Image (cartoon, grey):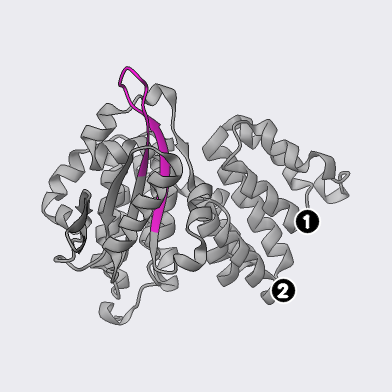
């Protein structure tokens, strides 16, 4: 029998999973970590992510360390419908000068937007005593102090029962994050933790769509060694057969594993999975590059189609899947990649269709 401790786990990638989770469940995120702030927001007025503007102010060359930060414009429930900005930072490892960087964000954002800027920091690292929550600068009687709320995910290790009772999606995401930290370098333990988390989704009565959606984040965080991927899916399939709730293995058939089994292997394993769960950009770009290097053109095309079908189904349901006959006629991987990237920002299936309509080739015999 293989020694569990000798089966290493793939590199952790907290940042992309958290970025996608924030953009998918932002009201739930604020309600989970800062409930008093969520209660003060007029959610009926919607909210706007200003991440493009944030990147323009803080270019990638200045943001080399591992972290996720989003900027969100919100409207309060006050009589003057005050708009505020919320800067959320998710930090997965300790960083020297962290407090100064947060202060720089605060000052530059206030100077540009002339609005109050609330900061919330989520620390997902494995150092219990690293809790930077204050920036102070003082010179010749001039003193600047900035304090901001900090959430330490390690603290939730003592609140697992509370997390189990919560129906907020971030209760599941936090548990997956903690399980990832706890199972580093132990593939078998990670497989058991991953299956236990997924099984609880069924037992707690989540809908099929909720199970599929939350599974994407669990799957992203708790990455398994290649040797354990198929045993995990076999165990999950057997469980779904027993409970007669085929919520996740149907998603697997639609995209994630099917794409891998049709020629993507390492190139699209990272590219497709990260593309689907991260905003469909960085991972997909790497998937394309690695796909070219491996020469698996047909596998890339099929994997992209599978990813498109999964994304259309999750976002638009049957109305989105109705586009798949068109998608099956597209054999250009670059066009398929453009379609996949367009799904996330699209409000309707018609907006996705507009990306390829003018370039849709005539049916091939194999397509009929």
Q: Which mark is residue 161?
A: none
Q: Position of residue 42 (x, y in %)?
A: 35, 24
Residue 129 versus residue 360 in the image, above or below: below
Identity of the residue drawn at 61% across and 42% down: 343
Q: Which mark is residue 332?
A: 1
Residue 109 versus residue 202: which sits nearer the camera?
Answer: 109
The answer to whether residue 31 is magenta is no
Identity of the residue drawn at 26% across and 34% down: 37
Residue 343 versus residue 253 in the image, above or below: above
Residue 280 versus residue 165: which sits nearer the camera?
Answer: 280
Q: Position of residue 253 (x, y in %)?
A: 54, 51
The residue range painted magenta reads 68-86
Q: Is residue 368 left or right of residue 201?
A: right
Identity of the residue drawn at 19% across and 63% down: 140
Q: Which mark is residue 295?
A: 2
The answer to whether residue 76 is magenta is yes
Task: Specify few, some or many for label 2: CA neighbours under 10 Å numbering under 14, 14-19, or 20 or more.
Answer: some
Disc 1 is placed on an element classified as loop
Q: Is residue 271 left or right of residue 149?
A: right
Query: Residue 13's quadrant in the figure?
Result: bottom left
Residue 214 versus residue 13 in the image, above or below: above
- Marks 1/2: CA distance? 15 Å
Q: Quadrant of the C terminus?
A: top right
Q: Position of residue 352 (x, y in %)?
A: 68, 38
Residue 168: tell me if it is visible.
no
Residue 216 versus residue 71: which sits nearer the camera?
Answer: 71
Answer yes or no: do the residues labelled 1 and 2 have beta carbons within 8 Å? no
């Amino acid at each position: 029998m293989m020694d569990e401790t000798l089966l290493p786990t793939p590199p952790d990638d907290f940042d992309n999973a958290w970025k996608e989770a924030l953009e998918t469940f932002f009201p739930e995120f604020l309600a989970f970590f800062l409930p008093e702030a969520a209660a003060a927001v007029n959610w009926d007025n919607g909210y706007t992510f200003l991440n493009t503007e944030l990147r323009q102010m803080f270019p990638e060359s200045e943001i080399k360390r591992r972290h996720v930060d989003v900027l969100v414009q919100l409207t309060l429930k006050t009589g003057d419908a005050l708009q505020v900005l919320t800067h959320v930072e998710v930090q997965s490892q300790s960083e020297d000068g962290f407090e100064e960087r947060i202060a720089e964000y605060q000052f530059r954002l206030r100077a540009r937007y002339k609005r109050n800027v609330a900061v919330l920091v989520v620390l997902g690292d494995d150092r219990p005593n690293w809790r930077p929550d204050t920036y102070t600068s003082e010179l010749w009687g001039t003193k600047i102090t900035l304090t901001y709320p900090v959430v330490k995910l390690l603290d939730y290790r003592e609140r697992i029962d509370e997390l189990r009772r919560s129906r907020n999606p971030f209760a599941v995401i936090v548990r997956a994050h903690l399980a990832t930290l706890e199972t580093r370098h132990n593939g078998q333990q990670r497989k058991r933790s991953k299956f236990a988390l997924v099984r609880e989704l069924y037992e707690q009565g989540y809908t099929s769509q909720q199970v599929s959606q939350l599974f994407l984040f669990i799957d992203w965080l708790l990455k398994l060694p290649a040797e354990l991927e198929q045993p995990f899916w076999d165990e999950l399939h057997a469980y779904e057969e027993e409970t007669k709730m085929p919520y996740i293995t149907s998603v697997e058939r639609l995209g994630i594993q099917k794409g891998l089994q049709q020629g993507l292997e390492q190139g699209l394993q990272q590219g497709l999975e990260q593309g689907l769960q991260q905003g469909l950009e960085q991972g997909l770009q790497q998937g394309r590059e690695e796909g070219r290097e491996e020469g698996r053109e047909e596998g890339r095309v099929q994997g992209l189609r599978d990813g498109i079908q999964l994304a259309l189904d999750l976002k638009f349901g049957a109305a989105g899947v109705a586009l798949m006959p068109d998608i099956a006629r597209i054999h250009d991987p670059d066009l398929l990649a453009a379609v996949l990237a367009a799904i996330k920002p699209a409000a309707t299936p018609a907006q996705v269709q507009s990306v390829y309509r003018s370039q849709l080739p005539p049916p091939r015999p194999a397509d009929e």
